[in-house]
Amino acid sequence: LALALLTGALTAQEAPADQRLKDLERKVEILSRELEAQKTGATMPAAPEKGSHGMAQAASKVYESKGGLSIGGYGEFLYQAKENKLQDGSTGVGEKNLDALRLILYTGYKFNESIVLNTEIEFEHGGYSDESPEGEAVVEFAYLDFLLSKGFNVRAGQMLVPMGFINEQHEPPAFLGARRPLVERNLIPSTWHENGVGIHGELPANLSYRVYLMNGLNAEKFTAEGIRDGRQFGKEANAQSLAWTGRLDWNPLPGSTVGVSFYTGNSNQSGTGEVLTTTLWDAHAEYRYRGLQLRGLYTRTSLSTPYLEALGPSDPARETGTRQWGGYLEAGYDLLGDRQALIPFVRLERMNTQAEVISGVVATGAFDQTVLTTGVNWKPIPNVALKVDLQKIENRARTGQNQFNIALGFYF
């Protein structure tokens, strides 16, 4: 405590009074946690204030460890209530459910300062799935990091595709809405993880990058909804065709991020027939200052046509859009700005997974969607978030249903 006070006094001439007070409170809180850990015999580090090496906060715990084992995780519970009225005024099915959506365990091991193992094991829907009624556990990532230098490191194993905001930063308190943005569920199919190897690091001028070579998507599972079902999840993944993915971010000012990411590869995993080149890219930006939070993303997907044209008329993959696009803008403001946060927010999304289709296929209009989400996010502490929002969902087929959501999420 004395050290924290002394540090604050030495910087008194450089920082405003309110900022000095916040800095002192933060340092006292850190010291208190360390003292408490010594008294209780705790050995696990707390989740860092910021993520590192492209990972979210709790997923970065192993990098902060002094060595050996680290354990973290996150979870979220979701209540969803769809209106029983469709956009065109007709009666639909009003669905309501309460779901133990996710429970995640991060387990890492720091062998030494240069070699780190990081893993994420996920239990979805209370451990139940339609494909595996007895329960299912999914490995979302499990990789070894060889930390060679600040600017050049090697990563190998099952890794998150480094696209968009949500796919890498998907711990519930990290995003404002009760549900992840639709654009980053269907167009960038979060959570998206495949097997591969790559490099990552930080460069001068506040730049960071990641570039991976991974197994490709499986086009046999593509549908009119998009490429989401083509993910292979590292499970005996067919690697007849590989794909490149990468990301470059720039942080010109504290609290700001501007970046681009991409994915490209052949999604025909049969080893025969036409190549299906699948290319995604996105541009994203985020700005945080005091209580203000702004975020925007635009993404576009293109698929080559010969493979799709050769499919039979009853094959669902034939309906896949050869051009897909989407984006969203989001704004929130923290009304409290202290140890708690109360953030009213609004997010507007537009997306179309059948913007263009091959000859003979008629776009339905149901996948040309607009979603307006308004709600509030309360964080009693940074690690816990209670989120309530209302979504106005419309599409060109006029079959959209509005939805009310409540979510409780945490990380540790």
Image: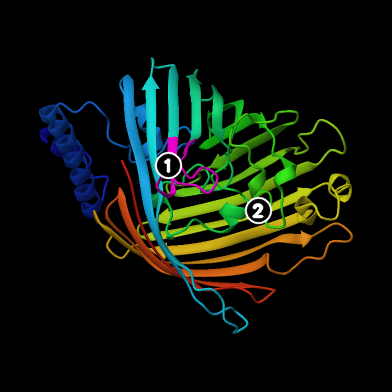
Tag 1 or tag 2, which sits nearer the N-term? 1
Residue at 81% of width from left, 30% of height from top? Answer: 271
The image shows residue 287 at horizontal and vertical percentages of: 47, 54
Q: Can residue 8 be seen in this view?
A: no
The residue labelled by disc 2 is: 299
Q: Is mark 1 on a helix, strand or loop?
A: strand
Q: Is mark 2 on a helix, strand or loop?
A: strand
Q: Which colour scheme is used?
A: rainbow
**Vertical placement of residue 312 versus 111, above or below:** below
* Three-letter code, disc 2: Thr
Residue 12 included in the magenta stretch of the image: no
Which mark lies nearer to you, 2 or 1?
1
Q: Where, quadrant-wise, is the N terminus in this rendering?
A: top left
**Horizontal relation, residue 116 to residue 371: left or right:** left
Residue at 69% of width from left, 39% of height from top? Answer: 217
Q: In this rendered view, identify the residue nearer to me: 316 or 308.
A: 316
Residue 124 included in the magenta stretch of the image: yes
Res 123 label: 1
